Amino acid sequence: MAHGPAALADAELIALLLRTGVKGTSVLQLSQNLLDNFNGLSGLLQAQPSDLQKIKGLGPAKRAEIAAVMELARRSLAQEMGKRPVFDSPQRVKDYLRMQLGHLGHEVFVVLFLDAQNHLVRIEEMFRGTLTQTSVYPREVVKRALELHASAVILAHNHPSNVAEPSRADETLTQTLVQAMRLIDVRVLDHLVVGKTEVVSFAERGLL
């Protein structure tokens, strides 16, 4: 309390959350084990409940606490995107999507629907696929944009391989959606490809 949470190491912050260790393992050791198992704080924040269950010493209560912290972080980022134009902080959008999609073992396609001021209106998972591909129907994206009165969209999907490099198919899909959305006067501001540790922006690559 004297020095603030920023003065604590990652393991010490997690230890405060967990409160107690297990027989033969202190709470600080348990916290460090978590970080080691998930390759740091970023990996831990993307962990699935099934992954946490494998860690000795994490009972249902501790797993629930960690899951709650992760969900609070996601909701905080989403709330911030609703309050100000998303391009005031592109990194916030990337962080949110990496937390939402980076850990998934299957491919999903999500759309961020924005208003005329580029404030977030809604984030929706539109399509879900296999490990290698997903079927994306432009008419469904167009229909939802009209229903939400969106002025712009940001497209995003994950690569379960964790390699965020856009494929030729990703580029083709992007152009198809850009053309479809143009017919209803909705701009496609970006397409983000999400890996576990990296998010690649089509706009930053000059692909839009």
Image: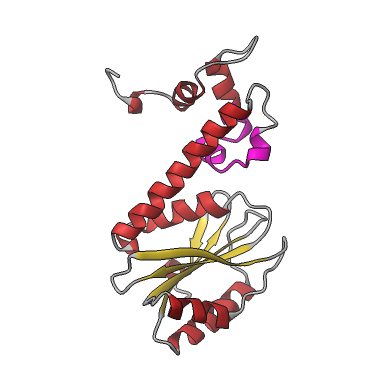
- Say which residue appears at 59% left-offset and 78% top-offset: 173
Q: Position of residue 149 (x, y in %)?
A: 38, 77
177 vs 126, nearest the viewer: 126
Where does the image place residue 40, in percent across and percent down from the top left?
Answer: 54, 34
User: Residue 116: image x %, image y %?
Assistant: 30, 74
Instruction: Identify whether 48 is placed above or below 116.
Output: above
Q: Position of residue 5 (x, y in %)?
A: 34, 26
Q: Is residue 36 magenta?
A: yes
* Quarter where residue 101 is shown: bottom right
Magenta segment, which residues? 34-52
Above or below: residue 105 compared with residue 135:
above
Q: Main secondary structure of the magenta part?
A: helix
- Compared with 58, 106 (above or below) is below
**Relative to residue 165, is residue 205 drawn left or right?**
left
Residue placed farthest to the bottom in the image?
A: 183
The answer to whether 8 appears left or right of 135 in the picture is left
Residue shown at 42% from the left, 67% from the top:
204
Q: Quadrant of residue 193?
A: bottom right
